[in-house]
Image (cartoon, coloured by chain):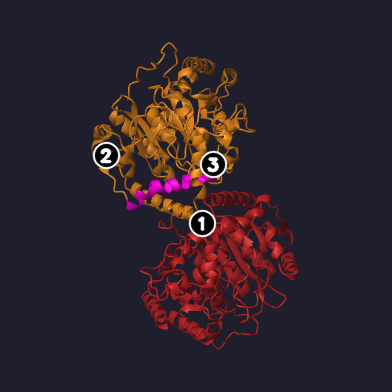
Chain colours: A red, B orange
Amino acid sequence: MVNQPELIALDREVEQMGLSASDAVRKMSEGQLTSEELVLDYLKRIEAHEPEVAAWAYIDPRIALEQAKTLDEKRLKGNILGPLHGIPIGLKDIIDTADMPTENGSDLFAGRIPERDATVTRLLREAGAVILGKTVTTEFALSGARATRNPYDLKRTPGGSSSGSAAAVSDHMVPLALGSQTGGSMLRPASFCGVHGFKPSYGSVSRTGVFILSRRLDHLGVYAQNLNDLALVGDVLMVRDYDDVEMCQYADQSLVGALAQQFSGTPRLAIFKGRPWDFVEKGVSSIFQDTIVQLESAIQDAHIPPIVEEALSVHEVIMDASAAANPGRYLAHAEKLLPETVKRISVGDEILASDYIVAIDKAERIRYALDQVLEKVDALVTLSAPGEAPLGLKSTGNPVFQKIWTLTGMPAISLPMMKGPNGMPIGLQLIGRRGHDAELFRTAQWVEGKCS
Amino acid sequence: MVNQPELIALDREVEQMGLSASDAVRKMSEGQLTSEELVLDYLKRIEAHEPEVAAWAYIDPRIALEQAKTLDEKRLKGNILGPLHGIPIGLKDIIDTADMPTENGSDLFAGRIPERDATVTRLLREAGAVILGKTVTTEFALSGARATRNPYDLKRTPGGSSSGSAAAVSDHMVPLALGSQTGGSMLRPASFCGVHGFKPSYGSVSRTGVFILSRRLDHLGVYAQNLNDLALVGDVLMVRDYDDVEMCQYADQSLVGALAQQFSGTPRLAIFKGRPWDFVEKGVSSIFQDTIVQLESAIQDAHIPPIVEEALSVHEVIMDASAAANPGRYLAHAEKLLPETVKRISVGDEILASDYIVAIDKAERIRYALDQVLEKVDALVTLSAPGEAPLGLKSTGNPVFQKIWTLTGMPAISLPMMKGPNGMPIGLQLIGRRGHDAELFRTAQWVEGKCS
């Protein structure tokens, strides 16, 4: 694990900081902690650090504390709502909340309060979570950055588009947060901010009530401090919602349950290189080698079928066309949008349907080719980003290490296991078979055990 | 059932004519009939009628008889390959066969012999079928008609694009044939030619080795003389093929098995009208009413959600864009294509990807809305075509009664139960829930029983 750099030291005076969600669940169930106490601690942390980190789009301590108190009262009556009872979580500000604004990172939606919760918001509330607040997103989850800074180095980007969610978990302002990924928006920020990140299989988490960037590519995901916490939230989210017509993968196994069973034997892991590796920064390749050498006999080389080489350009066609189709409808209000957004949603304006259809067909063939690879190994292993979080806040960094798995809908986990040349975190990314998220968790647990 | 009109009377001198595939299977298993005898009878029938009907793109009696003899020998040794052992079938000429040309209805592919069988061809051979020959298709399964005539009236179209398959089964040149549907190409010809037709759920039959018009819309289907025969072939075809990456529905129940169980009680049937009904020809609506009145208490009115009104225009965008993307690649050889084809594949040239994406999203919402309707009823009931087969061979008629179910991938069956003002057949169409093809067969059996 990477050491927390000194720019923002952890305030250990705030008692519960560093506590994982799973630990908090246990302490509450043992009567050693209330949700109100926990939420108050996080609010103190946010008060102290938010001026520098700028992770939150909206937070109202009263709304947060009110939820916590209600949940504490229910607990006293023996009414435990679910596995997240009393645990605070942050939601990327493209996820609708009926009691807080949801602005999609855009001035165009300033002050917008949705009529109803997104399906995932509802599932979290039903599981007993406290919706602590809304986290900063780039505009429309595209590339137009907002003000969030990387807690490991305030001069660096936290990544995007799920900037606030990754930064808030990294800075211990909240133990859990949801983000989304259409290009590389979940696991790149996880890598840059040194947190655990999970992008589930495509179609396994509802996107009803979430800003649509691309129905073909949009995924929701989770940030947390460890695998158990990712699994805890993943199990709550992976429930079929008939209102998201593209839902197609349904959890056949509990993620928490998968972690309770150790991996029997040694998983077969294959290193994935290919095109994204062209972007790897100086010195990072050897850091990766030093890490995976610990995995010993588990490691082999993945034979990657040639069509996978086309994945990045195929993703680009689908992403650009989708941006033109969905957020593109707001171009009429260009004066209220970031120049970067206007540029981004105009790129795909002239893409022809026939080229899009060819790209979709190729995407399915790429997925099929990678499915074949993943029938022979338990997971692919690669970097979560080409290097450390870049300096500056304008660019949120390069999503190249996520695009293939976003395109193919395969589940991916980023483990904060490496440290770059400047001491900044870099994630190790594991990719599993679509629909086999539980198996990926078990493999990831084995990898962490081997490298700790 | 419609009476066979007099233009081409059934040649009863050809002994086995009128025998269903299921009957032939039984007779063969009882040693009363050989595959060679059966194939010879069909070849005689074809020799007599093919000059007028023009249903076949390719037929070589030697290849057909050789298969039959080999299968008869295997039977003598007790080696029964499968449920279609010794039964002849015709394949639409967009389905690859390694031993016969596959020309996709186009001079551009004249004499093309594929390297390997399509997956469905292989499945049929493995089940013991005799591939009798290839049937006429419009060019690229679009609207450019070839020379096939309707056996009920040679001055009328058999419908298209599966013109030859429907006409050959109608004229008793073969007991079974495969066709395909991207717009209305399976069940419109079934209606016009007075045969039973089945378009399975989207993604339940492999399209590997079949000419691609639209991966999003292409379905394969079956023509036969009765429901049992459709079920017999359907069970052989509905097998997962990992090479067709869009396969998503897998038969959870045998169709033949479903027919062996009677429908318990009365199915809930709902009449579907909406947009396609605007095209219904004079006098046909009352014929439909007279038919469904026999279904008595089973019949109710379907409440159709407003978004379904958009299905026809949504289908058009997807179909036109797909034609531009797939057969559109042959535009460089326009001089070898039918003018109708060149026109058809040029229509979608300028459709933008963003408009296509909006159409795909709507298609999913339409499917969702109709899924909800079909949770409350066992099947929707409607016409299979706006009326009788039109006069003339240039147009293959109006596909408007199929487009919604092609778009939503719902299984549909056409039953030849009505007779139009000119004595030509008209089909009754039943539509079921996607992935619930077996239930639809059971409902269709009940409907036939009620109306016979």
Q: Nearer the viewer, mark 1 or mark 3?
A: 1
Identify which residue, A366 or B112, lies in the foreground.
B112
Rendered image: mark on residue B240: 3
The relative height of residue A137 versus residue B274 in the rendered view (above or below) is below
The amino acid marked with disc number 3 is Arg
Q: Which residue is mark 2?
A: B298
Q: Is residue B167 part of the magenta span, yes or no?
A: no
User: Are callouts 2 and 3 both on one chain?
Assistant: yes
The relative height of residue A186 versus residue B22 in the rendered view (above or below) is below
CA–CA distance between discs 1 and 3?
A: 23 Å
Q: Is residue B437 visible?
A: yes
The relative height of residue B260 versus residue B377 in the rendered view (above or below) is above
CA–CA distance between discs 1 and 2?
A: 40 Å
Q: Is residue A339 left or right of residue B263?
A: right
User: Going 63% across and 85% down the picture, which residue do you hit?
Assistant: A7
Query: What's drawn in magenta, residue-wise?
Result: B305-324
Q: Is residue A12 left or right of residue A105?
A: right
- SS class, disc 1: loop
The relative height of residue B32 versus residue B170 in the rendered view (above or below) is above
Q: Which residue is mark 1?
A: A216
Label 2 resides on the chain identified as B
Label 1 resides on the chain identified as A
